[in-house]
Image: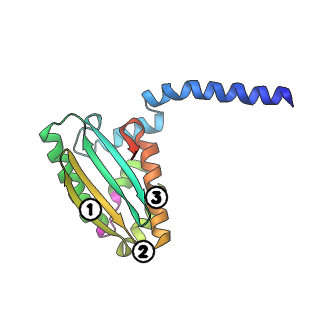
Amino acid sequence: MQRIGRMVWVSLAIAACGEGEETAQHTPRQAAVAERGTAVMPFDLEATTHVFEKTEYGGLQQVVVDTGDPQQVALVREHLKHEAERFSSGDFHDPAMIHGDDMAGLNELAEGHADLVIEFSELAQGAELRYSSDDPDLVAALHAWFDAQVSDHGRHARTSR
């Protein structure tokens, strides 16, 4: 038992040491997502951060330009405004192209879009989408979708602090 405990501890220590390295560089999946994202997102992923905040009735998705480049800000705003219109009609094709058809929460959001309110707003350095619903299953799907995006986008995404 003591030997197994040491093995688990060593495994955890190795995993913790390697974690920083994986965060600094993309995993193979994150690299593939970033590559597919260039066909969908017109802005420079390296110049932006996706921020996801879960709320009781939905959540907030922001794309913020880290460099302050006004052209990138305009591209982010244009893209998110377009996505808000598409998502409101149940069209989640773009995230499926980037993350895959089996992305967590995606099918539920597409099917339940009529019960999902999506509001676009400009930010000083980008834009945001605010999602809300009275349907707890739809909120859970949105939260799963947020988690999948944070995982898939790696260093280009984070949850709000």
* Residue plotted at (17% across, 41% down): 72
**Secondary structure state at the residue bearing disc 1:** helix
* Residue plotted at (76% across, 27% down): 7
Q: How many callouts does the rendering have?
A: 3
User: Residue 135: percent from the left, percent from the top?
Assistant: 45, 74
In this view, which residue lies farthest toward the left? 70
Pointer 2 local density, CA inside 10 Å: few below 14, some 14–19, many at least 20: few
Within the image, what quadrant is residue 80 found in? bottom left
* The magenta segment: 88-93
Give the Cα distance between marks 3 and 2. Answer: 14 Å
User: Residue 15: percent from the left, percent from the top?
Assistant: 61, 28
The circle on residue 125 is none
**Secondary structure state at the residue bearing disc 2:** loop
Q: Amino acid at mark 3?
A: His
- In the image, which is nearer the foreground, mark 3 or mark 1? 3
The circle on residue 143 is 3
Q: Amino acid at mark 1?
A: Ala
Question: Does residue 40 show up?
Answer: no
Which of the two discs, 2 and 1, labels the residue nearer the N terminus? 1
Choose between 109 and 150: the one closer to the eye: 150
User: Residue 26: percent from the left, percent from the top?
Assistant: 43, 32
Q: Where is mark 2, residue-wise? A: 134
Choose between 28 and 73: the one closer to the eye: 73
Which of the two discs, 3 and 1, labels the residue nearer the N terminus? 1
Q: Where is mark 1, residue-wise? A: 84
